[in-house]
Image (tube, rainbow, N blue to C red):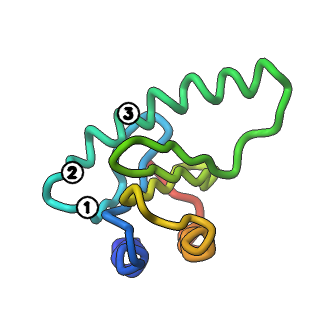
Amino acid sequence: MQQILENLNEELGIKGSLIMSPDGVVVASVLDDRIRDEVVAALISMVLLTLNRAIQETGYEPFDNFVMTASYGKLVVVNLETAYLVVISDQFIKLDLTQVEIASAAERIRRRGKLSV
C-alpha cells in the first residue's frame, strides 16, 4: 500500500495521501513533513461521521468519493468500503485530470483485499 501511495503522490499538485479506518486510525500514509497524518485522519473521521449519518437519513446510497475545498488546498476522500483513501492536494490542482489517477490507486488498494483495521 505504501508504494501505491508513493506513486500517487508523484502526480503534479498532490501533497500527500493516506489510508485510514472509518474511526480515524491511520493505516498507511505518505505525507509532506508539515502535514500530520493523525490530524488529517481526525478531521476526515469527524466529517465522515456527519456525512454518513446525513446520507443514511436521506436514504441515499453511500458515497464513492467527495472533495473538500479550502483556501490552501483540496482533500479528496475515496470510500474503499472498509477504509478510506485521503488525497491532499494544493489549491491549484485540476482534479478532473487527477481523478483518474486517484481512482486507479483506489482500485489497486481494493484489489489487495479487504483492509483489516
Tell me the distance, in whole angstroms, between the alpha carbons under discs 3 and 2.
12 Å
N-term-proximal mark, 1 vs 3? 1
Q: Is residue 36 above or below residue 103?
A: above
Asked if marks 2 and 1 touch (Cβ < 8 Å), the reply is: yes
Q: What element carries label 2?
A: loop
Image point 81% across, 38% down: which residue? 61
Residue that label 3 marks: 43
The image quarter containing residue 45 is top left
Q: Which mark is residue 35?
A: 2
Q: Which mark is residue 31?
A: 1
Q: Can residue 28 be seen by looking at this rendering? A: yes
Q: Is residue 80 above or below residue 69?
A: below
- Which residue lies most toward the left here? 33
Tell me the distance, in whole angstroms, between the alpha carbons under discs 2 and 1.
6 Å
Q: How many other residues sit within 10 Å of disc 3, few (<14), some (14-19) or many (≥20)?
A: few
Left or right of 114 in this view: 26: left
Q: What residue type is labelled 1?
A: Leu
User: In front: 68, or 46?
Assistant: 68
Q: Which mark is residue 13?
A: none
Residue 12 place in picture, x, y as percent = 39, 77
Q: Which amino acid does label 3 sit on?
A: Leu
Image point 42% across, 49% down: which residue? 20
Q: In which quarter of the image is the N terminus?
A: bottom left
Q: In this view, does 103 lie above or below 66?
A: below
